[in-house]
Amino acid sequence: MTASRGYKTMQSTRSNTETVEAEETQEERREAAAELVSNTPQTTAEQAAAHRTAKPRVVVVGAGFGGLNTARKLGDTGVDVLVVDRNNYHGFWPLLYQVATAGVEPDSIAYPVRAILRKFKNVGFRMTEVSGVDFERRRILTNTGDIAYDYLVLAAGSANNYFGNNALAENTIGLKDIDDAERLRNMLLSAFERAISTEDPRECEALMTFVIIGGGPTGVELAGALSELITFVLRKDYPMLDVSQARIILVEATDKILSAFPPALQKDARKKLKKMGVQLRLNSPVESVSEHEVTFKDGSKVRAQTVVWAAGVRASTITDELHVDLGKNSRVKITPTLQIEGHPEVFAIGDMAYLEGYKGDQAYPMVAQVAIQQGKQAARNILAHTEGRPMKPFHYFDQGTMATIGRRSAVLDAFGIHLTGRIAWLGWLFIHIIYLIGFRNRVIVLTNWAFNYFTYERGVRLITHTQREH
């Protein structure tokens, strides 16, 4: 108990000291920011926001789940907020696989950032690419000029992890953004169009073979949705093809899929996928992927024109330029109050952040709920610091995990309850509708799901542009 009180006293003292230092240098930084902004092309609204002198400036890098929840929590408070992102939209990435398999339109899972934030008078947005951070001068470096900050929240999300294998990046397609999902949809549909024209049986076989590397939720959900697209829709679109010869191969380096789920749910998922015709290839680490072939470490090979990479993620590549301590998957190591050690004015959250404490000594997972909750806590801690109050450590409320396996089936692990089948699927539907941003998006997605459910159709079977040839 004494040690605990001592720790709190130290934290309070540190917080008070940092507050005094912040007050002493805040005006200087604000003047520098005004000078910097005056030399950067801006709109009238941005110029007005940049020259406010009464409030500290919080810059949030990333408009994903974490960044938006930070900005919202800071909305209409005593700070000025600027959200920066390379895209002008917030995407609901858990549904990317449905865009890739023609289940929903791309714009139904995305929403303009400015529309989300415009109700907050103290929150602005700028579309720009962040390349690094100058901690000494308290500026982020972007392709449209430097941006000064009093507080910085790094919430740039994640990227595909190819473990240093550039050939994997070149010869596979990931699923991290709308562009990826549309490109994959184009590749899937184009493969069937090309299969009609070829007279080479080996080429036709490769065109109709789809390899998904990675047995986590993304790989499992994509495999299930692709199976239904082929079985119920493309079979009717291409009667001249023997669609039963199409193969979906789900590859996993370990002996299990959905490793974060309990064994009983893993077993149920395996059973469901096999029933849908998905070939499971467990204990099969990939050695290499060439232009039309996957080679496994045991020497075996599979010819395939379409190979999807869902085997690993890492923090956004911006972490490589920060020169701070990194944990597993290049995630930034942070303190329990979500700050970067040595830079108390800088916070890292979500997929970018490495903090142990999940189920004992594990790092918190790279999932949306962690980002949402950390975003809110980072905002609370920033406000506490500006008001001279001690910051509070992050505590995670685990709401469970779930994954869908085609229509009417899912696995759900939440609050000690394990569900499978239709009940789990309905729970999955409800959660995903709730977290979609925008009434229009919810209506469109729900309508699409209802249409797909009753008709077995996929209305977005469009090849919209020429994809990169494999």
Image (spheres, helix red, strand yellow):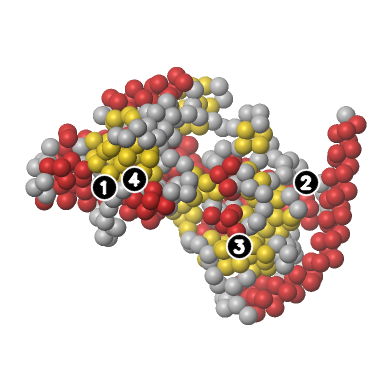
Res 207 seen here: yes
Can you see residue 92?
Answer: no
Q: Nearer the viewer, residue 217 or 317?
A: 317
Q: CA distance from mark 2 to mark 3?
A: 26 Å
Q: Secondary structure at mark 1?
A: loop
From the image, tell me which residue sits under label 4: 289
Q: CA distance from mark 3 to mark 1?
A: 37 Å
Quick check: 163 left or right of 338?
A: left
For marks 1 and 2, give the CA distance.
53 Å
Residue occupying the point 50% across, 62% down: 86
Q: Amino acid at mark 4?
A: Val
Q: In the displayed orientation, state which residue is furthest to the front.
A: 299
Q: Nearer the viewer, residue 450 or 420?
A: 420
Residue under label 1, please give it. 292
| Mark 2, residue position | 391
Amino acid type at mark 1: His
Per the rendering, the mark at residue 132 is 3
Identified at 67% across, 72% down, the residue is: 50
Pointer 1 local density, CA inside 10 Å: few below 14, some 14–19, many at least 20: some
Report x, y in % for residue 74: 67, 54
Front of the two marks 2 and 3: 3
First reached walking from the N terminus: tag 3 or tag 1: 3
Q: Amino acid at mark 2?
A: Met
Q: Quadrant of the N terminus?
A: top right
Name the secondary structure under disc 3: strand
Compare marks 3 and 4 and give the one earlier in the sequence: 3
Q: Give the quarter of the image for residue 283.
A: top left
CA–CA distance in space, label 4 to label 1: 8 Å
Type of amino acid at the residue the image marks with label 3:
Gly
* Nearest to N terminus: mark 1 or mark 2: 1
Q: Earlier in the sequence, mark 2 or mark 4?
A: 4
Q: Residues within 10 Å of mark 2 (few under 14, many from 20)?
A: many
